[in-house]
Amino acid sequence: MSLNAESTAFRSALEVIRAVEPRVADAIGAELADQRESLKLIASENYASPATLLAMGNWFSDKYAEGTVGRRFYAGCQNVDTVEALAAEHARELFGASHAYVQPHSGIDANLVAFWAILADRVESPALKKAQVRQVNDLTEADWFALRRELGNQRMLGMSLDAGGHLTHGFRPNISGKMFDQRSYGTDPATGLVDYDKVAEAAREFKPLILVAGYSAYPRKVNFRIMREIADSVGATFMVDMAHFAGLVAGKVFTGDFDPVPHAHIVTTTTHKSLRGPRGGMVLCGPELADQVDRGCPMVLGGPLPHVMAAKAVALAEARRPDFADYAQRIVDNAQALAEGLTRRGAKLVTGGTDNHLVLIDVTGYGLTGRQAEQALLDSGIVTNRNSVPQDPNGAWYTSGIRIGTPALTSRGLGVAEMDQTAELIHTVLSQTTSGESKAKYVLDPALADKVSKQANELLAGFPLYPAVDLG
Ligand code: DSN
């Protein structure tokens, strides 16, 4: 696509918006400027392609399309059917899945759809069975009471939050922690790695209905073949939330035992992290759960977002191109270079390194809390987020870790040499910051923050973001 086409498209869109509410047009332009200037190391963020972004701004946004392809609760969905079917086809082909449901609006939504499908498939509830075969009017108040009782308090075993698990895997602040009786498996205190024997032991004791694997802050691969064996040994449904590493699965960096799709009963993901698509979610599964998954809307989800499904189709088509595999490999090469650069300079990393797209620095090694480190880095033009580390002494708010990820900078074209420079900037800030009088306060010389910020900008200058987009 030529420079002119992209610039013209975005300039024209902003001109149309500006005529109605100029402050929105200004904010959109300012967001691009901010993203261009910051060293974005948030492990869950990326930069979608112009084609993906443009596919979202159109008339599909105006359409209701509850139901599934060819079976809608609204008339006139033929074009929505086209894009939903395309997105699902690309997803199936890309991941080798027999079924793909591309309607979830986010990762939380995708997980709720999966939980519903597993409950509906697995829980022995006569009332639920009646409700499923559309005899809802025949259900008595006692049936409904029984249905709620039978669906509630089912058991889920997932990775603990401080080991890198996700809030939606049964933790109290999320609805999954209120729906399910949850237990966690952690990581080995000495190595920081998942101890599969301990997971098996926890599964034998707890006998979960659902065994969940997947993480948002674990810097290593998970062996999904072993996890499936553990699930099978206790009759659990094995669910993998691959939101963080979907791009590495798509790009065939995670294969064999480390590709969740052949091993899990059901796989959920977001589409906007390492997969580099629009903000949204997706569920992959085999034929056994497909019917229940397809009930996601209106069972769990609000009306699908056809404009986002159009963008998912575009992004998934991009991920099927050979150059995406190269991108995925560079994400991991960059994360490993960043980990090596930090370790060489004395940083303490959870598990001592990384196999994936993220690195978790234990900032207690610098005498800081995660919150202090996050803000000091932000003052210096480096955008990261604080994160718990295993057995975190500072709790989930202040934390003791900084999570950094490479999908976004890799999309910009930065490589291993620039990762070493990035490690130097991060280490400089963290080693020059001292703890203040509270877990949130810190002392950092503003001149140093300014100097690092300028160096970060110089580093980025060689790798322009959206180089073909000139907003004028
Ligand atoms: N918020 C995402 C992350 O940053 O990992 C997960 O939901």
Image (tube, grey):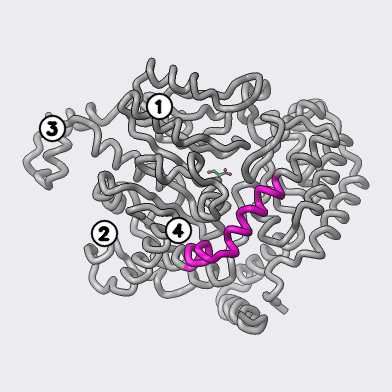
| Residue corresponding to mark 4 | 94
Amino acid type at circle 3 is: Pro
Amino acid type at circle 2 is: Gly
**Residue 348, percent across and down?**
76, 30
- Give the Cα separation between the discs numbered 4 and 2: 24 Å
Mark 3 and 1 residues: CB-CB less than 8 Å, in contact? no
Earlier along the polypeptide chain: callout 3 or callout 1?
A: 3
Question: Residue visible at 76% across and 41% down?
Answer: 375
Q: Is residue 327 magenta?
A: yes
- Residue 126's mark? 3
| Residue corresponding to mark 1 | 230
Question: Residue visible at 68% across and 65% down?
Answer: 32
- Give the Cα separation between the discs numbered 4 and 3: 38 Å
- Give the Cα separation between the discs numbered 4 and 1: 27 Å
Q: Residue furthest left?
A: 138
Q: Is residue 407 magenta?
A: no
Q: Quadrant of residue 228?
A: top left
| Residue corresponding to mark 2 | 67
Q: Is residue 443 visible?
A: no
